[in-house]
């Protein structure tokens, strides 16, 4: 199949293209209206169709004779537990828990928050909600009570579904007490809290709203799938907002199912029955799309991994999982690869395992630097495919579409436009930029199926944040450029572009050079206040472990390399060595936080930060090196 012809058809005739893709699903009522607009004049897909995603993820495969196929492999190095769950077993668990939720009075259109670790029960809860038309909102397990309370007040759940605890490497996180505290803080009070007790020593005081998971499930009759409209919200997923209040992304049912089914085959190149692993968490969009719904819609075996790329027990964990479970396609974040690379720079641990099962390695979640890409290619010896998407899109916007035509990899690029996405590079006036000229990344409307429908309870913020800047386009918030072959290079959030003495420079390009230094394990480059030039770039680096490096020499080499690659105009003069960089729990480096600390601006500690103690570590390094306005 030819990528260009296939892509062009999706842009020139979107209704015909997506009608064809929708036929890959088993609808209760097949849609006749493929594309129309809602009362806000925003595109809407398959409005008159009816279906149920839980049915498509489970019952349909059993009816087709695949009930004994493994649907979920639970691999938990932190508890030394492995479990294989067939589609038959999955139906039993999901339908009975859905029946239990119905017995609590939850019905189609109600909301429920799911606050759970990476255990099979998290998937049971999501699929059970989908089974009876309850709109779920998964909140990343371990979020502080204050953050959970904000989400409770926003989506007003009738029930919260949680577990006694999660495990962060060797540290126990008591989820249930967090939930109790969040309910104290919230204005809105849910009717029920359903808790799965992992029997790992966490205790809590019984509350009137408490319901035991096992008791609820065992006393319930199995629930049959409820028919929902294509545009019925499947879930709300909160993402960070610039105002400090999280944005509740609304995902529809029919468009999302169509897009995910399409993406599994045509982007990720997996066939029905293959083992697929997205090493993420159900609290993030990757977990929704590619741990739960995408693989199960496509009858893939999906892996639920409760662990980390390192220290559970070591940097060989990912390779052991791939080899042992015969993973065909794997998806993780570049930061996970960098963590492995730091512990095992020569890839010696990988040599213990037979990796011949692996066909493709996908990377996303942040920009993939060339050094990480090359290291992964060298050691895995398979195509390593960077791709780009957002919580808002729900599935990839840029990729190398492995299931259509595997194109050459261009290091630094997240690939070409995925079918359905008419991606343009615009200037601030909305004019299209020429090839290799940097601008703002926008997608011409209509967006394809599966993308955000709106923001929960805040349509004005939806329009202002995404549609207002360029009428007729969705604005991604990212900068980038497109080369003469149509490959797109994402340079980062627009506020990662710095202005040095009138020159607009990409800190991402500088970061690419820094990351390529042989001693650097991880790095961040960002602009800080400069009295003379407006802004100047600052680099923070984490050195590879188990090496005796001469820090001053490395710093001088990096400054010289950036000067050579970018030019003196970059004014790149300062590199500081830190022990670690602040990140979100999904692995994104918090560059804006690093910049605000340096500029001595007020900042809120992001709720997604991996370890708040890093902030003081960074402040100490800044003080020692006289970084800051004063």
Image: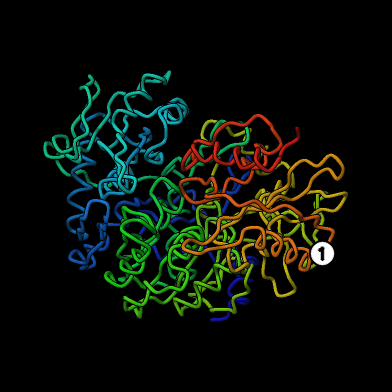
Please name whichever residue, 61 or 69, is drawn nearer the observer in this view of the structure. 69
Quadrant location of the C terminus?
A: top right
Please name whichever residue, 539 or 140, is drawn nearer the observer in this view of the structure. 539
Please name whichever residue, 333 or 70, is drawn nearer the observer in this view of the structure. 333
Q: Does 464 sit left or right of 573 as displayed? A: left
Please name whichever residue, 482 or 622, is drawn nearer the observer in this view of the structure. 622
Which SS class for mark 1? loop
The residue where tag 1 is placed is 567
Residue 82 in sight = yes
Residue 410, image quadrant: bottom right
Whole-percent x, y for residue 385 in the image = 53, 70
- Position above or below: 25 against 170: below
Whole-percent x, y for residue 166 in the image = 30, 42
Q: Does 127 sit left or right of 19 as displayed? A: left
Residue sitting at the far left: 219
User: Which color scheme does this rendered protein use?
Assistant: rainbow
- Position above or below: 448 against 470: below
The residue at the point 38 percent across, 38 percent down is: 142
Whole-percent x, y for residue 372 in the image = 55, 67
Q: Does 610 sit left or right of 37 as displayed? A: left
Residue 66, image quadrant: bottom left
The residue at the point 17 percent across, 51 percent down is: 92
Residue 226 in sight = no
Judge the density around disc 1: few (<14), some (14-19), many (≥20) Cα neighbours within 10 Å. few
The residue at the point 44 percent across, 42 percent down is: 233
Q: How many marks?
A: 1
Q: Does 499 sit left or right of 555 as displayed? A: right
- Position above or below: 532 against 366: above
């Amino acid at each position: 199949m030819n990528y260009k012809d296939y892509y062009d058809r999706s842009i020139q005739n979107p209704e015909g293209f997506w009608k064809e893709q929708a036929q890959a699903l088993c609808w209760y009522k097949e849609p006749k209206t493929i594309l129309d607009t809602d009362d806000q004049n925003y595109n809407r897909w398959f409005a008159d169709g009816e279906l149920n995603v839980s049915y498509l993820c489970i019952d349909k495969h059993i009816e087709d004779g695949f009930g004994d196929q493994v649907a979920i492999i639970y691999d938990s190095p932190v508890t030394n537990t492995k479990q294989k769950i067939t589609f038959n077993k999955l139906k039993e668990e999901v339908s009975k828990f859905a029946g239990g939720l119905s017995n609590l009075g939850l019905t189609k259109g109600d909301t429920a928050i799911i606050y759970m670790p990476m255990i099979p029960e998290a998937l049971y809860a999501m699929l059970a909600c989908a089974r009876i038309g309850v709109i779920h909102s998964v909140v990343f397990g371990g979020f502080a009570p204050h953050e959970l309370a904000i989400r409770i007040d926003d989506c007003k759940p009738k029930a919260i579904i949680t577990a006694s605890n999660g495990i962060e490497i060797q540290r126990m996180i008591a989820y249930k007490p967090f939930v109790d505290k969040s309910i104290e803080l919230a204005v809105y009070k849910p009717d029920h809290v359903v808790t799965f007790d992992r029997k790992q020593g966490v205790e809590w005081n019984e509350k009137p709203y408490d319901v035991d998971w096992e008791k609820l499930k065992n006393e319930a009759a199995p629930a049959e799938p409820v028919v929902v409209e294509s545009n019925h919200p499947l879930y709300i997923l909160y993402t960070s907002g610039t105002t400090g209040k999280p944005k509740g992304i609304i995902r529809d049912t029919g468009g999302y199912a169509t897009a995910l089914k399409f993406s599994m085959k045509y982007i990720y190149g997996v066939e029905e029955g293959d083992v697929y692993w997205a090493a993420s968490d159900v609290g993030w969009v990757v977990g929704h799309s590619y741990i739960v719904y995408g693989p199960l819609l496509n009858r893939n075996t999906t892996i639920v991994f409760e662990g980390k790329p390192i220290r559970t027990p070591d940097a060989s964990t990912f390779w052991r999982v791939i080899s042992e479970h015969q993973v065909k396609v794997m998806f993780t974040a570049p930061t996970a690869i960098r963590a492995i690379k730091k512990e095992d720079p020569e890839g010696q641990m990988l040599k213990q395992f037979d990796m011949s099962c692996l066909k493709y390695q996908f990377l996303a979640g942040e920009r993939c630097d060339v050094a990480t890409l090359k290291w992964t290619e060298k050691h895995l010896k398979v195509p390593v495919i960077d791709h780009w998407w957002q919580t808002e899109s729900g599935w990839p916007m840029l990729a190398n579409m492995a299931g259509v035509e595997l194109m050459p990899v261009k290091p630094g690029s997240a690939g070409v436009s995925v079918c359905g996405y008419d991606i343009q590079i615009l200037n601030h006036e909305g004019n299209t930029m020429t090839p290799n000229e940097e601008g703002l990344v926008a997608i011409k409307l209509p967006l394809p199926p599966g993308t955000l429908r709106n923001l929960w309870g805040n349509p004005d913020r939806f329009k202002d944040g995404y549609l207002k800047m360029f009428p007729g386009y969705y604005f991604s918030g990212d900068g980038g450029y497109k080369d003469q072959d149509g490959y797109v290079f994402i340079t980062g959030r627009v506020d990662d572009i710095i202005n040095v003495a009138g020159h607009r420079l990409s800190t991402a390009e500088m970061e690419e050079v820094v990351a390529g230094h042989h001693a650097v394990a991880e790095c961040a480059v960002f602009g800080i206040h400069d009295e003379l030039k407006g802004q100047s770039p600052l680099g923070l680096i984490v050195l590879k472990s188990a090496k005796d490096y001469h820090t001053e020499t490395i710093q001088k080499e990096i400054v010289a390399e950036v000067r050579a690659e970018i030019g003196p105009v970059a004014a790149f003069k300062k590199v500081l060595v830190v022990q670690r960089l602040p990140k979100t729990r999904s692995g994104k480096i918090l560059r804006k936080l690093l910049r605000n600390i340096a500029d001595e601006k007020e900042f809120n500690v992001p709720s997604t930060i991996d370890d708040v103690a890093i902030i003081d570590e960074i402040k100490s390094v800044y003080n020692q090196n006289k970084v800051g306005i004063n």
